Amino acid sequence: MLRGIVMESSLYERDFYAWTLEQCKLLKVGDFERLDIVNLVEEIESLGKQQRRELEHRLGILVGHLLKWDYQPEKRSKSWWATIREQRRAAQRLIDQHPSLKAYLGEAMIEAHESGLDLVVKETPLNYRDLPAEPIYTLEQLLDPNFPDALD
């Protein structure tokens, strides 16, 4: 309540799904005057950030499993190899679907290294001091389906 006036919450705040349907309808019919521009801009920016986070996430899991593969060769498994293949394909698919993400790959690889380290420390007896502080894999290696050599 503001100075005795009850402020009605917007559809965006009350029912996001209904808000998206309304915004689509307004766009389709060209009713640009009634569009919720402020929230539309916020949501579009959020979608772009979501693609960046997804790429970081996929690369982080990939780096983590590559580190486990390299730093615990005696524990290599089909599961690790399958995860490496799966995350590599998912990351490559994101890059193929959203080519502008290529400009973000350098930053994403740094984030992925940090996430990969966290994954290894959580899932193995290794500690951060046992692992490389800086990224050791190139983008080419991360996306190369033949790297590392497959589990025989």
Image (cartoon, grey):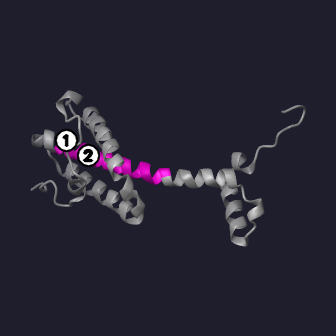
Instruction: Give the quarter of the figure containing the N terminus.
Output: top right
At label 2, the amino acid type is Val
In the image: residue 74, left or right of residue 40 = left
At label 1, the amino acid type is Lys
Across and down, in percent, residue 137 comes to 21, 48
Depth check, front residue: 102 or 118: 102
For disc 1, the marked residue is: 68
**What is the distance, in whole Å, between disc 2 and disc 1 at their CAs?**
9 Å
Q: Say above or below: 98 vs 9.
A: below
Q: Which class describes the residues within 10 Å of circle 2: few (<14), some (14-19), or many (20+)?
A: many
Across and down, in percent, residue 110 comes to 31, 43
In the image: residue 51, left or right of residue 123 = right
The secondary element bearing badge 2 is classed as helix
What residue is drawn where x is 64% and y is 55%? Answer: 40
Span shown in magenta: 49-69
Quarter holding residue 9? top right
Quarter holding residue 13? top right
For disc 2, the marked residue is: 63
Instruction: Give the quarter of the figure containing the C terminus.
Output: bottom left
The secondary element bearing badge 1 is classed as helix
